[in-house]
Amino acid sequence: MPMPSRVTSFRVELVAAGLLATAPAPALAQTVQLHEIEPRTFGYQLGDLIERHAEVSVPAGWRLDEASLPVPKPGFAIELREARWEKPPWWRPGGTFRLTLRYQVLGSPPAPQLLELPPVLLRFEGKRPQGVRLDGVPVMVSPLVPEPAPERRGFGALQPDLPAPLIPVQPLKARLAAEGLIAVLLLGGLALETWGWPGRRVERPFDQAWRTLRRLPDETSAAQWRQALAVLHQALNRSAGEVLFAPGLDEFLARKPAFAPLRPELERFFALSRRSFFAPGSEDIPDPGWLKGLCRRARALEREVR
């Protein structure tokens, strides 16, 4: 990549140099001016091309002395391959010319070496002789093949690969063990919640209801009666797997035909429940013994099914 452009210092060789230094502005406009784009100064190897570009503003009435252009010729480390002077369009009596110098690197030093592109002096003929100078440019040339590494142990050109570092797995093992233990405990808790302890008799809905209703006294208050009805409602809901009301009794008995002999009593139970909960003004309290008998018979049928 070319270095940033800058206006290089140029040296004008004039016969009357002292007069030009104090000349007025119109006289300065009649001088040849040089603008050079410096090439990259590093990263070259054998066979690479180096180009120098410059723009030369030549006033009308002056022309280049082509004998001052550098001539391509063989070199030792760097040689000039081409020198091209591009003129402006013919309709301009004066203007900006382009100078291109193309060099080629011919040497491959054993170590990085600083070489120099030679300076160039361009002469112009006109009312009075003038000249501009391109200063020499240093460039860094690198060897084509790097210097071989020493043959001492550990410094050879090729070295064996380092073994892959071992990842400490002990913390990972401990974490996996802890997570596995937590998973086992959670699964065990879920299994106990679903099936209970191994060998333990599964508590049936009407078994649980019977343990509560058998303690129901023969003389009960309205609140005790409604509580007893709620206990049997809960047993029926658990047995049906859903909240069971009177309209769903037929479907329940179709799925649980073992309870079919209890149809009349279950219909009466739902009627009593509806009257007790939704007709609170009624003081007619049925015999609690009948309710306990219904629960006992449902418990017996439930055991036969399971």
Image (cartoon, rainbow, N blue to C red):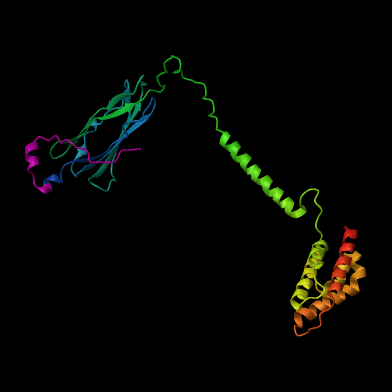
Front position in the image: 204 or 156? 204
Which quadrant of the figure contains the C terminus?
bottom right
Residue lying at the far right of the rendered structure: 261
Q: Is residue 11 left or right of residue 85?
A: left
Q: Residue at x 80, y 71 (%)?
A: 217
Which quadrant of the figure contains the N terminus?
top left
Front position in the image: 261 or 112? 261
Magenta portion: prevailing SS class: loop
Magenta part of the chain: 1-26
Q: Residue at x 25, y 47 (%)?
A: 92
Q: Is residue 99 left or right of residue 188?
A: left
x and y, in percent, of residue 153 in the image: 45, 15
Residue lying at the far top of the rendered structure: 152
Q: Is residue 266 left or right of residue 141?
A: right
Determine the image quadrant of residue 96.
top left
x and y, in percent, of residue 228 in the image: 78, 71
Q: Is residue 258 left or right of residue 148?
A: right
x and y, in percent, of residue 146 in the image: 41, 22
Above or below, 144 relative to 84:
above
